[in-house]
Image (tube, rainbow, N blue to C red):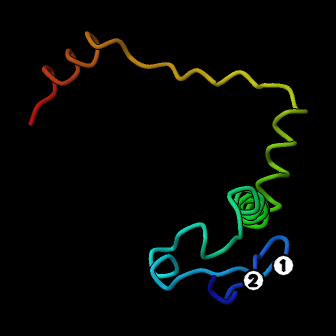
Amino acid sequence: MNKPNTICRVCKKEYFCCSDRKSLNSWKAMACSPECFKEYMKRIHAARKPAAEQTILNTKESSPVEKPKTIKKKPAEEAGKLSRNAKP
């Protein structure tokens, strides 16, 4: 068996990871098991999620939904009449 050359980023256990796996960015390059890798990815996603985004999500859930404002547009017929009657 090969000597441990890598430390798991979750449980800190030492394990062996060959250079091929490291160069391919395999899960084995960061964690000793698939379970530790899943935990590692959860931690990474939580750390990268900005606090401001979390605040916005919480605000949207608690605030009432506003109705969008309607914009009155001219009917297509009126717009056509105006352009036909206009002089160059």
User: Residue 47, position in %: x, y?
Assistant: 78, 67
- Residue 62 vs 31, above or below: the answer is above
Query: Between 8 and 44, which is closer to the camera in this rendering?
Result: 8
| In this rendering, position of residue 53 left or right of residue 1 | right
- Residue 8 vs 19, above or below: the answer is above
Residue 32 in which image quadrant: bottom right
**Distance between the alpha carbons at the discs numbered 1 and 2:** 5 Å
- Residue 48 vs 78, above or below: the answer is below
| In this rendering, position of residue 18 left or right of residue 59 | left
Question: Mark number for residue 12?
Answer: 1
Residue plotted at (82% across, 77% down): 13
Q: Earlier in the sequence, mark 1 or mark 2?
A: 2
| In this rendering, position of residue 24 left or right of residue 7 | left
Q: Amino acid at mark 2?
A: Ile
Point out the image quarter for the N terminus.
bottom right
Residue plotted at (35% across, 12% down): 75
Q: Residues within 10 Å of mark 1 (few under 14, many from 20)?
A: few
Q: Going by the picture, which residue comes out furthest to the left? A: 88
Say what secondary structure mark 2 lies in: strand
Point out the image quarter for the C terminus.
top left
User: Residue 38, position in %: x, y?
Assistant: 71, 56
Query: Between 77 and 32, which is closer to the camera in this rendering?
Result: 32
Q: Residues within 10 Å of mark 2 (few under 14, many from 20)?
A: some
Say what secondary structure mark 1 lies in: loop
| Number of disc labels | 2
Q: Amino acid at mark 1?
A: Lys
Residue plotted at (75% across, 76% down): 8
Question: Mark number for residue 4?
Answer: none
Residue plotted at (77% across, 82% down): 14
Question: Mark number for residue 7?
Answer: 2
| In this rendering, position of residue 58 left or right of residue 72 | right
Query: Between 9 and 61, which is closer to the camera in this rendering?
Result: 9
